[in-house]
């Protein structure tokens, strides 16, 4: 029986491994840490020697943790969290037991997130919430890597699982949001509260840059033509300001209609299948600390207020 020896494993190697697990590629991890890719590779190699087993499966689109990698990651997260807590205590800083780390997709930060955090601050002012925006794959990996406690994710039909790793994430649907169309107030389509899907042929679109499953976010789904993308932007507010400037059309969740800037009209689209987006709160399958549970309750309440009529 081979006995694994982690006595010489450094904290640097553990931090690098967690970053790789979260970022999904050695290159991205190196960039985030300010290391060279070869330095990251050396740290991973030192861990794999100690484990006497591959921890990463190298693929063309990045890396994926092996079964052994999941075990090492789970233990590494525990060790690093304890080391960080020790450093704070020695520095005379308060413990972070009341801190919750939340990840969220772009449009959640416009209305839902501020409302939930504000409500939590009123009811439980001792709880600190730190947040970060990210694409769905990044947020899912961050949950797995233990650098997020909760993640707000958006899901589109056919509502597939966010990943195939084990154990499966615990998912709670907070609501379903209907999709709307944002048009300039000067555009002919702004004359009515609704338009027909056939009227969208030949329009110019403002969309998010292609990124896997998030390809062409901003174009009405299922168009029977290749859309003309006039502008690309990741930030939904930038898209809406481009709409206000008359640069094209974009899609927007119905819950964001109140946040649309002047010069934008939000309309419904008739014809074709109804487009729905599901708002999901994701976490690892383990008991939630009370601060995280309180934030989850605040998010559910805010979502119920926003999506009750959508």
Image (spheres, rainbow, N blue to C red):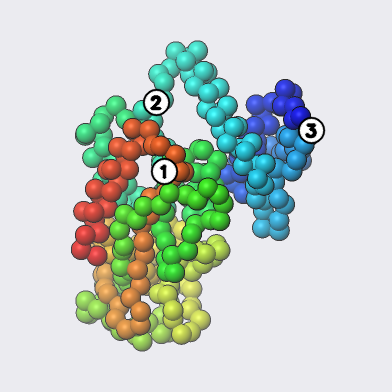
Whether pointer 1 and pointer 2 mark residues with C-beta atoms closer than 8 Å, the reply is: no
CA separation in Å, label 1 and label 2:
15 Å
CA separation in Å, label 3 and label 1:
37 Å
> Looking at the rendering, which quadrant does residue 187 occupy?
bottom left
- Describe the element under mark 1 as helix, strand or loop: strand
Question: Dot 1: within a 10 Å radius of its alpha carbon, few (fewer than 14), some, or many (20 or more) residues?
Answer: many
**Which residue lies under the disc numbered 2?**
97
Q: Quadrant of the C terminus?
A: bottom left
- Describe the element under mark 2 as helix, strand or loop: loop
**Which residue lies under the disc numbered 1?**
150
Residue 196, given in percent of the width and then of the height, sits at 30, 84
Residue 237, given in percent of the width and then of the height, sits at 36, 57
Residue at 38 percent across and 33 percent down: it is 289
Residue at 72 percent across and 22 percent down: it is 7
**Which residue lies under the disc numbered 3?**
2
Q: Quadrant of the N terminus?
A: top right
Which callout, 3 or 1, points at the residue further toward the start of the chain?
A: 3
In depth, the one of 26 and 289 nearer the eye is: 289
CA separation in Å, label 2 and label 3:
38 Å
Q: Is residue 107 left or right of residue 137?
A: left
In depth, the one of 107 and 50 nearer the eye is: 50
* Residue 103 sits above or below residue 10 on the image: below
Mark in the foreground, 2 or 3: 3
* Residue 116 sits above or below residue 257 on the image: above
């Amino acid at each position: 029986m081979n006995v694994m020896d982690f006595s010489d494993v450094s904290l640097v190697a553990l931090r690098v491994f967690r970053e790789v697990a979260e970022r999904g590629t050695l290159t991205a991890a190196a960039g985030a840490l300010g290391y060279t890719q070869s330095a990251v590779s050396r740290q991973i190699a030192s861990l794999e020697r100690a484990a006497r087993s591959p921890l990463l499966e190298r693929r063309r689109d990045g890396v994926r943790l092996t079964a052994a990698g999941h075990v090492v990651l789970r233990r590494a997260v525990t060790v690093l969290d304890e080391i960080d807590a020790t450093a704070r205590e020695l520095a005379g800083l308060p413990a972070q037991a009341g801190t919750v780390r939340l990840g969220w997709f772009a449009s959640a930060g416009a209305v839902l997130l501020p409302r939930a955090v504000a409500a939590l601050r009123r009811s439980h002012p001792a709880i600190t919430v730190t947040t970060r925006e990210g694409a769905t794959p990044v947020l899912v990996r961050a949950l797995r890597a233990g650098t997020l406690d909760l993640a707000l994710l958006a899901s589109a039909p056919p509502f597939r699982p966010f990943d195939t790793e084990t154990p499966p994430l615990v998912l709670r649907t907070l609501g379903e949001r209907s999709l709307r169309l944002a048009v300039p107030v000067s555009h002919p389509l702004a004359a009515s509260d609704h338009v027909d899907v056939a009227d969208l042929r030949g329009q110019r679109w403002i969309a998010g840059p292609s990124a896997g499953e998030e390809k062409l976010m901003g174009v009405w789904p299922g168009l029977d033509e290749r859309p003309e993308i006039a502008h690309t932007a990741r930030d939904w507010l930038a898209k809406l300001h481009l709409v206000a400037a008359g640069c094209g059309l974009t899609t927007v969740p119905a819950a964001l209609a109140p946040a649309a800037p002047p010069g934008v009209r939000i309309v419904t689209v008739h014809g074709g299948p109804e487009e729905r987006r599901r708002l999901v709160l994701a976490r690892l399958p383990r008991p939630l600390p009370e601060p995280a549970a309180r934030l989850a309750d605040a998010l559910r309440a805010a979502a119920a207020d926003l999506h009750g009529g959508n």
